[in-house]
Amino acid sequence: MEKINLSEWTMFSNRHNSENFNSPDGEWMLKLGFPGFCSTKEELLREQDICRKVVSLGIPTPQVGEIVEQDGRLGLIYERIVGKRSISKCVGEEPERLENYIKIFAENCKKLHSTSCVPGTFQDAEEKYLRLLEESKMFPENVRTFVRDLVKNTPKVYRCLHGDLQTGNLIVNDDGAYFIDLGEFACGNPLYDLGCYYYFCHYLPDDFLLATHYMNASMMRKCWDVFAKFYFGADTPEKLATVDAQVKPYVLFPILDFEHLLAESKNLKYLEMNFQVAKKDLGF
């Protein structure tokens, strides 16, 4: 791990979990985390290892470089993807092309979810969520029982999962599309990933979505409907209703993820409100 001098680097974004800089030669970018967000050496070593394994599987993602330190903060260096925009930003800036961009997202998700992985290469999604369930302070016992049964009855497959699947984590430029933010990459059934995207599209408020995804809740719900058409072939209201019924229970898993990540954050109260809405939708 080397120290870095940012005097010649250029900041290009300041997000809720990191500051991002471009290198002087324009070939690399630095994601410099804030405390609490991938801020320890162990967390960054894990993400670095995941990125290298993902590249070896042929899944498109920027090459990862070294871990660096700047004034006591740690970060990771990545290949810079010139001219990139997230799918979220593309849709927000060009809503008339929503269907085109969400088709790109759906097609890349299908490729990701068709990629097999050897057990043990990445964290096992089932084991992770059962562990988080036992740690949860939010889930009452009836919901815990439901989640345990859902995991038990979900077909066991070994497919690549992003772990934080949403349109902000696929970037595109003229050369192609690339998955980013792979810290929660996992192995398991794609339904866990799909539940995460369903959650983003149906349970988050306008202010959060506009600030982080360039879209309001109504547009996000439209994104889900278009995604379901291209991912599942749900091209009629009846087919879409069937897909929604299949995927909706899996929104409980990203809620477990975020409960863990937000345990010390004031934003946990918003997650609790989302959880109450999800419980009602699921009949609890």
Image (cartoon, helix red, strand yellow):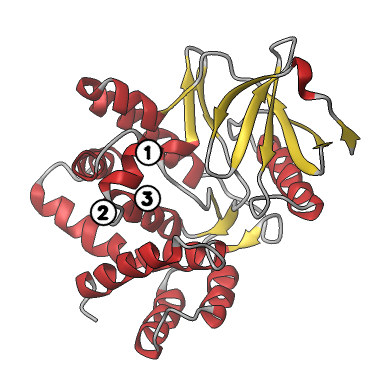
Residue that protrudes farthest toward the bottom in the picture: 141
Marks 3 and 2, the one that precedes in the sequence: 3
Nearer-the-camera pick, 224 or 200? 200
Residue contact between numbered discs 2 and 1, judged by CB atoms under 8 Å? no
Q: Quadrant of residue 61 in the image?
A: top right
Assign the C terminus to one quadrant of the image. bottom left
Tell me, for residue 14, which label it has, or none.
Answer: none
Nearer-the-camera pick, 134 or 194? 134
Q: Is residue 274 above or below residue 36?
A: below
Residue occupying the point 42% across, 65% down:
255
Question: Is 75 left or right of 15, judged from the image as shown?
Answer: right
Residue that protrudes farthest toward the top in the picture: 25
Nearer the observer, disc 3 or disc 1?
Answer: 1
| Callout 1 amino acid | Ala
| Callout 2 amino acid | His
Give how far apart the Cα atoms at labels 2 and 1 are.
Answer: 16 Å
Give how far apart the Cα atoms at labels 3 and 2 are.
Answer: 9 Å
Question: Is 124 left or right of 142, judged from the image as shown?
Answer: right
Question: Is 120 left or right of 164, judged from the image as shown?
Answer: right
Say what secondary structure mark 3 lies in.
helix
Name the residue tied to disc 1. Answer: 211
Name the residue tied to disc 3. Answer: 197
Q: Is residue 210 above or below residue 268?
A: above
Residue occupying the point 23% across, 38% down:
226
